[in-house]
Image: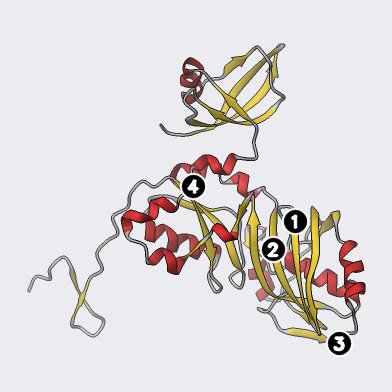
Amino acid sequence: MTVPADIERSPQGGMAEKRAPIVRREVNGVLLLDKPVGLSSTQAMAAAKRLFRATKAGHTGTLDPFATGLLPVCFGEATKFSRFMLEARKAYRATLKLGEVSSTGDTEGVITRQSSVAVDGAQVQHVLRGFVGPQSQTPPMHSALKHGGVPLYELARKGIEVERSPRAITINAISLVSLAGSQMVIDVDVSKGTYIRVLAEDIGRTLGCGAHLTDLRRTATGGFDVTSAVSLDALAGYPQNGLDHLLLAPQSLCTGLPEIQLDAGDANIFCHGGWVGINAGAPAVGEYAVYGPDRSFLGVGDVSGLAGKTRLSPTRVTVS
Protein backbone atom coordinates (compact mmCIF):
# COMPACT_ATOMS: atom_id res chain seq x y z
CA MET A 1 0.00 0.00 0.00
CA THR A 2 1.28 3.46 -0.88
CA VAL A 3 1.30 5.81 2.11
CA PRO A 4 -0.09 9.29 1.21
CA ALA A 5 2.33 12.20 1.44
CA ASP A 6 0.63 13.60 4.55
CA ILE A 7 0.65 10.28 6.43
CA GLU A 8 3.54 8.40 7.98
CA ARG A 9 3.81 5.21 9.99
CA SER A 10 3.77 5.55 13.77
CA PRO A 11 6.35 3.80 15.98
CA GLN A 12 3.64 1.21 16.78
CA GLY A 13 3.28 0.31 13.11
CA GLY A 14 -0.01 2.10 12.53
CA MET A 15 -0.66 5.23 10.56
CA ALA A 16 0.10 8.63 12.03
CA GLU A 17 -0.64 12.03 10.59
CA LYS A 18 2.50 13.62 9.20
CA ARG A 19 3.06 17.23 10.21
CA ALA A 20 3.00 19.50 7.19
CA PRO A 21 6.31 21.25 6.55
CA ILE A 22 6.48 24.90 7.52
CA VAL A 23 6.48 27.19 4.52
CA ARG A 24 9.11 29.82 5.32
CA ARG A 25 8.86 33.44 4.22
CA GLU A 26 10.99 36.57 4.20
CA VAL A 27 10.46 38.52 7.42
CA ASN A 28 12.41 41.68 8.25
CA GLY A 29 12.24 43.40 11.60
CA VAL A 30 12.81 43.23 15.35
CA LEU A 31 10.54 41.41 17.78
CA LEU A 32 10.68 42.40 21.45
CA LEU A 33 10.19 38.99 23.05
CA ASP A 34 9.51 38.38 26.74
CA LYS A 35 11.50 35.16 27.20
CA PRO A 36 9.87 32.65 29.53
CA VAL A 37 11.62 30.71 32.25
CA GLY A 38 12.98 27.31 31.28
CA LEU A 39 14.02 28.09 27.71
CA SER A 40 17.45 29.10 26.49
CA SER A 41 17.69 32.23 24.37
CA THR A 42 18.26 30.08 21.30
CA GLN A 43 15.19 27.95 22.04
CA ALA A 44 13.03 31.03 22.56
CA MET A 45 14.32 32.58 19.34
CA ALA A 46 13.65 29.34 17.43
CA ALA A 47 10.07 29.25 18.76
CA ALA A 48 9.46 32.82 17.60
CA LYS A 49 11.04 32.06 14.22
CA ARG A 50 8.71 29.10 13.80
CA LEU A 51 5.62 31.15 14.68
CA PHE A 52 6.59 33.83 12.17
CA ARG A 53 7.65 31.19 9.62
CA ALA A 54 10.73 33.31 9.08
CA THR A 55 13.65 32.15 6.94
CA LYS A 56 16.33 33.81 9.08
CA ALA A 57 16.49 34.86 12.73
CA GLY A 58 18.93 35.60 15.53
CA HIS A 59 18.82 36.92 19.09
CA THR A 60 20.71 39.80 20.64
CA GLY A 61 22.16 38.66 23.94
CA THR A 62 21.98 35.44 25.93
CA LEU A 63 19.65 35.00 28.87
CA ASP A 64 20.11 31.91 31.04
CA PRO A 65 17.23 29.39 30.95
CA PHE A 66 16.16 30.30 34.49
CA ALA A 67 16.02 34.01 33.60
CA THR A 68 13.11 35.83 31.96
CA GLY A 69 12.55 39.14 30.25
CA LEU A 70 13.49 41.21 27.26
CA LEU A 71 15.10 39.37 24.36
CA PRO A 72 15.10 41.29 21.07
CA VAL A 73 14.82 38.78 18.22
CA CYS A 74 15.99 39.88 14.77
CA PHE A 75 14.50 38.60 11.53
CA GLY A 76 15.95 38.87 8.05
CA GLU A 77 17.67 42.18 7.34
CA ALA A 78 17.61 43.13 11.02
CA THR A 79 20.14 40.37 11.79
CA LYS A 80 22.78 42.52 10.06
CA PHE A 81 22.53 45.09 12.85
CA SER A 82 22.06 42.82 15.90
CA ARG A 83 25.57 43.58 17.20
CA PHE A 84 24.40 47.01 18.34
CA MET A 85 22.12 45.27 20.85
CA LEU A 86 24.85 42.85 21.86
CA GLU A 87 27.05 45.82 22.74
CA ALA A 88 24.30 47.82 24.47
CA ARG A 89 23.95 48.37 28.21
CA LYS A 90 21.29 46.26 29.91
CA ALA A 91 19.04 46.53 32.96
CA TYR A 92 17.85 43.74 35.24
CA ARG A 93 15.75 43.11 38.32
CA ALA A 94 17.54 40.50 40.36
CA THR A 95 16.49 38.56 43.46
CA LEU A 96 19.24 37.40 45.81
CA LYS A 97 19.09 34.83 48.59
CA LEU A 98 21.41 36.00 51.34
CA GLY A 99 23.15 33.51 53.60
CA GLU A 100 23.50 30.79 50.95
CA VAL A 101 26.30 30.21 48.43
CA SER A 102 25.55 28.14 45.33
CA SER A 103 28.01 26.14 43.24
CA THR A 104 26.77 27.95 40.12
CA GLY A 105 25.87 31.31 41.63
CA ASP A 106 22.19 30.65 40.97
CA THR A 107 19.41 28.11 41.56
CA GLU A 108 20.79 25.58 39.07
CA GLY A 109 23.61 24.59 41.40
CA VAL A 110 23.80 23.09 44.89
CA ILE A 111 24.14 25.04 48.10
CA THR A 112 27.75 24.77 49.25
CA ARG A 113 27.69 27.05 52.29
CA GLN A 114 25.11 28.57 54.62
CA SER A 115 25.45 31.30 57.21
CA SER A 116 23.30 33.58 59.32
CA VAL A 117 22.06 36.87 57.89
CA ALA A 118 22.24 40.01 60.01
CA VAL A 119 22.09 43.00 57.68
CA ASP A 120 19.87 46.05 57.52
CA GLY A 121 18.84 48.42 54.74
CA ALA A 122 21.45 51.04 55.56
CA GLN A 123 24.26 48.50 55.45
CA VAL A 124 23.01 47.07 52.16
CA GLN A 125 22.68 50.53 50.60
CA HIS A 126 26.25 51.32 51.57
CA VAL A 127 27.56 48.08 50.05
CA LEU A 128 25.59 48.54 46.84
CA ARG A 129 26.96 52.05 46.32
CA GLY A 130 30.45 50.57 46.40
CA PHE A 131 29.73 48.49 43.30
CA VAL A 132 28.83 51.44 41.05
CA GLY A 133 31.41 52.33 38.42
CA PRO A 134 34.06 50.69 36.23
CA GLN A 135 35.57 47.47 37.57
CA SER A 136 36.85 44.04 36.54
CA GLN A 137 34.82 40.85 36.77
CA THR A 138 35.92 37.24 36.27
CA PRO A 139 33.41 35.24 34.19
CA PRO A 140 31.95 32.20 35.97
CA MET A 141 32.74 28.64 35.00
CA HIS A 142 29.05 28.03 34.43
CA SER A 143 28.88 30.23 31.34
CA ALA A 144 28.78 29.86 27.56
CA LEU A 145 32.27 31.28 27.11
CA LYS A 146 34.60 28.82 25.43
CA HIS A 147 38.00 27.44 26.42
CA GLY A 148 39.77 25.57 23.64
CA GLY A 149 36.50 25.49 21.72
CA VAL A 150 34.57 23.92 24.61
CA PRO A 151 31.90 25.88 26.53
CA LEU A 152 32.97 26.50 30.11
CA TYR A 153 29.75 25.05 31.49
CA GLU A 154 30.59 21.68 29.91
CA LEU A 155 33.96 21.68 31.67
CA ALA A 156 32.31 22.74 34.93
CA ARG A 157 29.88 19.81 34.74
CA LYS A 158 32.91 17.50 34.58
CA GLY A 159 34.43 19.16 37.63
CA ILE A 160 37.10 20.91 35.60
CA GLU A 161 37.97 24.51 36.37
CA VAL A 162 40.18 26.61 34.12
CA GLU A 163 41.68 30.03 34.56
CA ARG A 164 39.55 32.90 33.19
CA SER A 165 40.76 36.37 32.43
CA PRO A 166 38.95 39.23 34.21
CA ARG A 167 36.84 41.52 32.01
CA ALA A 168 36.39 45.24 32.25
CA ILE A 169 32.74 46.03 33.02
CA THR A 170 30.76 48.97 34.36
CA ILE A 171 27.89 48.99 36.83
CA ASN A 172 26.07 52.15 35.74
CA ALA A 173 23.51 52.10 38.55
CA ILE A 174 22.30 49.79 41.29
CA SER A 175 19.43 50.31 43.73
CA LEU A 176 17.73 48.36 46.50
CA VAL A 177 14.11 47.51 45.72
CA SER A 178 13.34 45.48 48.84
CA LEU A 179 14.96 43.62 51.72
CA ALA A 180 12.91 41.06 53.63
CA GLY A 181 14.86 38.72 55.85
CA SER A 182 17.27 36.84 53.63
CA GLN A 183 15.65 37.91 50.36
CA MET A 184 16.95 41.00 48.62
CA VAL A 185 15.70 42.50 45.34
CA ILE A 186 17.83 44.96 43.39
CA ASP A 187 17.63 46.84 40.10
CA VAL A 188 20.89 47.09 38.15
CA ASP A 189 22.00 48.83 34.96
CA VAL A 190 25.18 47.34 33.54
CA SER A 191 27.52 47.29 30.55
CA LYS A 192 27.75 44.39 28.14
CA GLY A 193 29.55 41.31 29.42
CA THR A 194 28.38 41.72 33.02
CA TYR A 195 27.35 38.53 34.82
CA ILE A 196 24.64 39.25 37.37
CA ARG A 197 25.31 35.90 39.07
CA VAL A 198 28.85 37.01 39.79
CA LEU A 199 27.61 40.39 40.99
CA ALA A 200 25.21 38.62 43.37
CA GLU A 201 28.05 36.51 44.75
CA ASP A 202 30.27 39.57 45.17
CA ILE A 203 27.51 41.46 47.01
CA GLY A 204 26.98 38.52 49.36
CA ARG A 205 30.70 38.22 49.97
CA THR A 206 31.00 41.93 50.79
CA LEU A 207 28.04 41.69 53.17
CA GLY A 208 29.82 38.81 54.91
CA CYS A 209 27.00 36.30 54.58
CA GLY A 210 27.25 35.04 51.01
CA ALA A 211 24.48 35.10 48.41
CA HIS A 212 23.25 33.57 45.20
CA LEU A 213 20.80 34.57 42.49
CA THR A 214 17.29 33.08 42.73
CA ASP A 215 15.49 35.11 40.06
CA LEU A 216 16.58 37.31 37.18
CA ARG A 217 14.52 39.40 34.78
CA ARG A 218 15.95 41.59 32.04
CA THR A 219 13.93 44.79 32.03
CA ALA A 220 15.66 46.86 29.34
CA THR A 221 18.37 46.83 26.70
CA GLY A 222 19.53 49.31 24.09
CA GLY A 223 16.65 51.71 24.67
CA PHE A 224 13.97 48.98 24.57
CA ASP A 225 11.82 48.15 27.60
CA VAL A 226 10.25 44.85 28.63
CA THR A 227 6.86 46.55 29.00
CA SER A 228 6.75 46.63 25.19
CA ALA A 229 7.63 42.93 24.83
CA VAL A 230 5.28 40.09 23.92
CA SER A 231 5.29 36.53 25.26
CA LEU A 232 5.47 33.34 23.22
CA ASP A 233 2.01 32.38 24.47
CA ALA A 234 0.62 35.68 23.22
CA LEU A 235 2.37 35.23 19.87
CA ALA A 236 0.78 31.82 19.46
CA GLY A 237 -2.64 33.44 19.80
CA TYR A 238 -2.10 35.90 16.96
CA PRO A 239 -3.41 35.17 13.46
CA GLN A 240 -0.59 34.59 10.99
CA ASN A 241 -1.41 37.77 9.09
CA GLY A 242 -1.25 39.85 12.26
CA LEU A 243 2.21 38.94 13.52
CA ASP A 244 4.18 41.38 11.37
CA HIS A 245 2.45 44.33 13.03
CA LEU A 246 4.45 43.48 16.17
CA LEU A 247 7.79 44.06 14.47
CA LEU A 248 9.98 47.13 14.75
CA ALA A 249 11.96 48.29 11.71
CA PRO A 250 15.58 47.05 11.41
CA GLN A 251 16.88 50.61 11.93
CA SER A 252 15.43 50.58 15.45
CA LEU A 253 18.59 48.69 16.41
CA CYS A 254 20.70 51.66 15.32
CA THR A 255 19.00 54.49 17.22
CA GLY A 256 22.12 54.97 19.32
CA LEU A 257 24.14 55.93 16.26
CA PRO A 258 24.40 59.42 14.77
CA GLU A 259 22.81 59.79 11.34
CA ILE A 260 23.93 60.78 7.86
CA GLN A 261 21.49 61.44 5.01
CA LEU A 262 22.65 61.01 1.40
CA ASP A 263 21.27 62.35 -1.85
CA ALA A 264 20.03 59.94 -4.51
CA GLY A 265 23.34 59.65 -6.34
CA ASP A 266 25.46 58.97 -3.26
CA ALA A 267 22.80 56.64 -1.87
CA ASN A 268 23.04 54.51 -5.00
CA ILE A 269 26.84 54.33 -4.72
CA PHE A 270 26.66 53.48 -1.00
CA CYS A 271 24.09 50.71 -1.53
CA HIS A 272 26.30 49.10 -4.16
CA GLY A 273 29.30 48.94 -1.82
CA GLY A 274 31.11 52.09 -2.83
CA TRP A 275 32.40 54.89 -0.63
CA VAL A 276 31.20 58.45 -1.01
CA GLY A 277 33.08 61.64 -0.26
CA ILE A 278 31.81 64.08 2.33
CA ASN A 279 33.11 67.58 1.83
CA ALA A 280 30.96 70.15 3.60
CA GLY A 281 30.48 69.92 7.35
CA ALA A 282 32.47 66.73 7.63
CA PRO A 283 31.21 64.60 10.55
CA ALA A 284 33.40 63.05 13.19
CA VAL A 285 35.12 59.74 12.50
CA GLY A 286 33.01 56.73 13.50
CA GLU A 287 29.92 54.69 12.63
CA TYR A 288 26.69 56.23 11.38
CA ALA A 289 23.18 55.11 10.51
CA VAL A 290 22.78 56.04 6.86
CA TYR A 291 19.54 57.19 5.20
CA GLY A 292 18.56 58.05 1.64
CA PRO A 293 16.83 61.24 0.43
CA ASP A 294 13.39 59.80 1.26
CA ARG A 295 14.53 58.79 4.78
CA SER A 296 14.78 55.16 3.69
CA PHE A 297 17.25 53.24 5.85
CA LEU A 298 20.29 52.20 3.79
CA GLY A 299 22.44 50.62 6.46
CA VAL A 300 25.46 51.50 8.57
CA GLY A 301 28.60 53.22 7.33
CA ASP A 302 31.97 54.20 8.69
CA VAL A 303 33.31 57.74 8.36
CA SER A 304 37.08 57.97 8.04
CA GLY A 305 39.68 60.43 6.88
CA LEU A 306 42.05 59.53 4.06
CA ALA A 307 44.54 61.80 2.29
CA GLY A 308 42.89 64.88 3.71
CA LYS A 309 39.42 63.81 2.57
CA THR A 310 36.50 62.55 4.61
CA ARG A 311 34.61 59.61 3.18
CA LEU A 312 31.76 57.32 4.15
CA SER A 313 32.21 53.60 3.49
CA PRO A 314 29.43 51.00 3.91
CA THR A 315 29.87 48.36 6.62
CA ARG A 316 26.38 46.77 6.52
CA VAL A 317 23.87 47.59 3.78
CA THR A 318 20.20 46.66 3.56
CA VAL A 319 18.69 44.93 0.55
CA SER A 320 16.21 47.31 -1.05
State which tag comes first along the sequence, 3 or 1: 3
**Amino acid type indicated by mark 2:** Tyr
Q: Which mark is residue 115?
A: 3
Q: Which mark is residue 92?
A: 2
Q: CA distance from mark 1 to mark 2?
A: 8 Å
Q: Which mark is residue 248?
A: 4
**Viewer-nearest of discs 3 and 1:** 1
Q: Secondary structure at mark 2?
A: strand
**Amino acid type indicated by mark 1:** Val
Number of other residues with Cα within 10 Å of mark 2, as a class: few under 14, some 14 to 19, many 20 or more: many
Work out which quarter of the rendered image holds the N terminus and state it. Answer: bottom left
Q: Is residue 140 shown to the viewer in this render? A: no
**Percent of width and height locating residue 12:** 23, 85
State which tag comes first along the sequence, 2 or 4: 2
The residue at 63%/62% (across/down) is 150
The residue at 50%/28% (across/down) is 295
Q: Quadrant of residue 9?
A: bottom left
Q: How many marks?
A: 4
**Viewer-nearest of discs 3 and 2:** 2
Q: CA distance from mark 3 to mark 2?
A: 26 Å
State which tag comes first along the sequence, 1 or 2: 2
Q: Are marks 4 and 3 in contact (CB under 8 Å)?
A: no
Q: Which mark is residue 190?
A: 1
State which tag comes first along the sequence, 4 or 3: 3
**Percent of width and height locating residue 306:** 69, 16
The residue at 64%/49% (across/down) is 222
- Say above or below: 182 vs 234: below
Q: In this view of the protein, which residue sits in the foreground, 117 or 311?
A: 117
Number of other residues with Cα within 10 Å of mark 1, as a class: few under 14, some 14 to 19, many 20 or more: many
Q: CA distance from mark 4 to mark 1?
A: 24 Å
Number of other residues with Cα within 10 Å of mark 4, as a class: few under 14, some 14 to 19, many 20 or more: some
Q: In this view of the protein, which residue sits in the foreground, 9 or 235?
A: 235
